Amino acid sequence: MPAPLRYAPLLVLLPGCAASGRLGAQTKLLAGDLTAEAQGTIAVGAAGSHAGKGAFVPVLTLSGGVIPRTGRGTGSFEGGGDYAWLASPAVSLRLGPRVGGAWGGEPGGYLGLRGGVAVALESPGRERTYPVVLFEALAAPGVGGDLAGTFVGGLGVSFGAEYYGLFRVPSGRPMRKRGRAVVAPIVARRAWRDAAKPALRGLTPAVRRALGRAWLREARLEHASIATFANLSMQLLACGAPPELIGGAHQAALDEVHHAKLCFGLAAAYLGEEVDPGALPAVDSCKPSLARLAVESLVEGVIGEGCAALLATRRRRAARDGTVKRVLGAIAREERRHGELAWAVVAWSVREGGARVAKAVRDAWARDLRRAPASLRVADKLAAHGLATSRDLAAALTLTRLRAAGRLDALLAGARPLSLPAREP
């Protein structure tokens, strides 16, 4: 089930899920004349692969101003992109190519590089808009017009806001409202906790807090997933599903109770305080249909929980704490069972609904392939206590999609082959 991730501005950039806008000022040298310009920059979406600590961001900048020496007006535009690297939780470093053109005072074109430092004015921690300031420099040779054969350079500073949607780490299958997981508030009691006793010796208070918060986030999402499977059983009943699927949904809900208790136990141990879920907010159920059943089971179950099972397995291998290994082993086994239940629901829905449901499944598959794993920086001591890394997440997601593609091709026999990720990790 997905959980929000800590990220830096300009770093976690996913296709169709990134948007930013900035306004600022810059001084630029054009064919020997200094200019003073106001500039605006926008970035929407991302291109290329998301790898490790960075992502490629397409950008467009427009600017206009005056040449102080002559008083003549000038303007310019730049298109290109930046590759961004995480330097700290709130700072990213940027460098990328630019194709630009100027008009007015010294018209012409240029090719070059622009780079700088972006700083979030608030510490990023959730999926929302953050104010940022960007300091950057431009260096380029002129390639056309009055700028041909001359140097073009500049310095700028801009302020703005940036929003990034995230591919969230799978863990369970929570109910959603407007795309966000609906989770219960935290209360100080101990009804929902396993007697987990991870090794705490040698962990600093800051590391314990980081681990506790991560496991608490996971616990809340596992708890919220109980409602998802209760709702799934109601939808299956309303669609006339066989008893095996309905029984599987109820068993999955009991599994999520188990997962929640395990995770709340770890969270309480690391935080050193009592943490339990309060009342889960109610979410109105959608009108049941075979197409909705199939799509939700594909995206949240086949892909989401299938990825969660593989991710838990990788996390268990990296973990060094025996209690954490036990928890992740149990989650991996039961999430695999949930993934198989999701496959059964998809297959039954397609058989019952025919071409209309098959098309909905294919469209959902195409949309899911546009999502990319987020970038996570996890210290060794955190990975030793069960936290996922970027490599773990990317490998689990890619392998899940590879396995799903073959099964979906068989299920949707006679249709064109499904798109695949480039390679298996």
Image (tube, grey):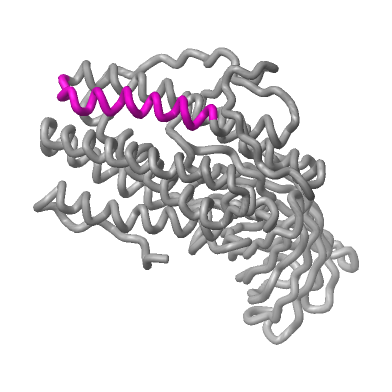
Residue 118, picture quadrant? bottom right
Residue 126 lies, with reference to residue 252, above or below; the image says: below
Q: Which residues are magenta?
A: 240-261
For residue 128, say whether it is visible. Answer: no
Residue 261 lies, with reference to residue 204, above or below; the image says: above
List the single residue furthest toward the right: 69
Q: Main secondary structure of the magenta part?
A: helix
Q: Is residue 75 left or right of residue 398?
A: right
Question: How far from the left and from the top, in percent, is residue 316?
Answer: 52, 51
Nearest to the observer: residue 103 or residue 277:
277
Q: Determine the residue positioned at 86% across, 62% down.
A: 71
Q: Is residue 245 magenta?
A: yes
Question: How far from the left and from the top, in percent, is residue 205?
Answer: 81, 41
Question: How far from the left and from the top, in percent, is residue 400?
Answer: 36, 53
Question: How far from the left and from the top, in percent, is residue 42?
Answer: 63, 51
- Circle count: 0
List the single residue furthest toward the bottom: 149
Quadrant of the drawing holding the C terminus: bottom left
Nearest to the observer: residue 249 or residue 126:
249
Residue 134 lies, with reference to residue 175, above or below; the image says: below
Q: Determine the residue positioned at 76% across, 55% down.
A: 88
Q: Is residue 36 left or right of residue 394?
A: right
Q: Determine the residue positioned at 74% across, 41% down.
A: 208
For residue 103, say whether it is visible. Answer: yes
Nearest to the observer: residue 172 or residue 252:
252
Q: Is residue 154 magenta?
A: no
Nearest to the observer: residue 108 or residue 344:
344
Q: Determine the residue positioned at 81% across, 46% down.
A: 204
Residue 106 lies, with reference to residue 149, above or below; the image says: above
